[in-house]
Structures are given as C-alpha cells and as structure tokens.
Amino acid sequence: MESTTEPRGLAIPTAAVIGIVVVTGSVFHTWLHHRVHGVYNPTQIGLAFFLVINVLVNWWEIALMVCQDQIHAEYEAIKEPYRGREMQRIGEIFARPIPLLQVLSFRQWTTIWSGYSLFDPGYSDRRSFGYNIDVGNGFTTIIPATVFAFGMTFELMPARWLGILGVIMFWQMFYGTAVYFFQFFNNGRHKGHSVKDLLLFVGITNLMWFVFPIWGLCTSVELILEGSYGVFR
C-alpha cells in the first residue's frame, strides 16, 4: 500500500516531475535538432514531444508488471473510499510529493496505476487485456521510441530503415489503443462514471496514442517513399 509517512529530503509533486521530464526532454530534442540542422521542424518537435511522453509512460508500464502486487493492494484499499470520487483521488496522486532521489523508483509510480484502476480495474489484474497490452508496450517500445526520437536528428540509419521502424512502432501504438478502447466500453468499464470524468482522464490521456501514432505513421511512410530525411528538415 501507499506509504503514509512524509518523504525525506527534497520532494517534488508528481505533476511537477512529469512536467519537468516532458518539457526538458522535448526542449532537449528540439535544441539538438536546431543545433545540428539549424531548423525548427514542426514534425520533429511534435513527434519528439510525444516520444518523450511515451518513454516516460513506458517506465510506468514496466512498473505495472514489477509492482503489480503493490498496485493491487493500493487499489483494494481505495476502491470503496473513493467510489464516486475518483477524480479526487487522481488529484491527490498528482499532488503527491516524490522524493527527488527516488524519482526512478518503480514503487513511486504505483499510484498512477492504482488510481487508473478506479476507472479500469483491469490494471490491478494480471489477466486483463489492459494490463498485458501496456506491459507489452512498456518493454517493446521504449527502445524503438528512443531510437526514433534521436534518429530524426542524427540519421542513425538510412531513412527507409527508420521509416520501417516507425511504421512497426506507431502501428502497434495505434492498434493497441484502438483495441483497448473497444474492450473498455465492451466490458462496461465506463459505467458508473460521469462523461466529464471519462473524457478528462480516460479520453484525453489515451487520445494522444491515437493522434500522434497516426502522425508518426504518415511520417514513417514518407521516410520510406522518399528515402530521405527531408520531412524533418
């Protein structure tokens, strides 16, 4: 279960940690690209922004497997007290301070999943589709996403190869999200939640894995057809 003791040393709210990682990573990739090529390219900036977020979420997805017992225990402890008040719990999670020296600890990120389990209990169950697709994504896309993000700038391989990598990776993201949404509603996970809460937490968070993978797919196809990195220049 989640610790109730005050964190020792410097601690930063969870939302701030996420913001710092995403902004710093995105700015870093944008700066690198401009330093190497002298341009600010919207496609490179947009996909770098998404891939930084994806790698962060990949870390959480690995934590989903490593700390599943803790996540299940946290969910069991909060599901009744927060019934009908799910968004209050989400607010508490993002306000929760994380000790600076433990930011990379999987156990510091379990509340993300126990909180999400208030909307989809599958994330506290190893047998569910949501659990397995996300754990799979965590292990299989963290390296390709990193390679693609740096490959847009440093041309780590021929453009067509990066395009092929992108097609495989972005299609996996899009398809997995589409099937997840289907099973979410097909299994009645939406019942008992307001439309506003579903849109704010389930809809917006997952929508990114529709929009950006489509953008990434189109870009990857262009890399293959053109055989050059012109789309990023």
Image: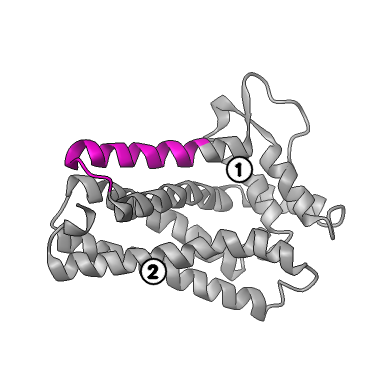
Residue in the foreground of this view, choosing between 36 and 138? 36
Q: Residue at x 58, y 66 (%)?
A: 130
Dot 2 amino acid type: Ile
Is 187 covered by the magenta stretch?
no
> Which portion, as a residue range, is magenta?
20-40
The circle on residue 68 is none
State the image coordinates of residue 55 (x, y, percent, origin top left): 43, 48
Q: Residue at x 58, y 78 (%)?
A: 182
* Residue farthest to the bottom, as pictured: 186
* Residue farthest to the top, as pictured: 9
Is 36 covered by the magenta stretch?
yes
Q: Residues within 10 Å of mark 2 (few under 14, many from 20)?
A: some
Total number of numbered labels? 2
What colouring does the structure picture have? one colour
Q: SS class of the residue under badge 2?
A: helix
Residue in the foreground of this view, choosing between 101 and 191? 191
State the image coordinates of residue 47 (x, y, percent, origin top left): 36, 54
Residue 14 picture quarter? top right
> Does residue 130 appear to the left or right of 146 in the view shown?
right
Q: Which residue is mark 1?
A: 109
Residue 231 picture quarter? bottom left
Q: Earlier in the sequence, mark 2 or mark 1?
A: 1
Dot 1 amino acid type: Trp
Q: SS class of the residue under badge 1?
A: helix
Magenta segment main secondary structure:
helix
Q: Which residue is mark 2?
A: 214
Residue in the foreground of this view, choosing between 32 and 84? 32
Depth check, mark 2 against mark 1: the one in front is 2
State the image coordinates of residue 224 (x, y, percent, origin top left): 18, 68
Q: Residue at x 23, y 63 (%)?
A: 163
Q: Quadrant of the N terminus?
A: top right
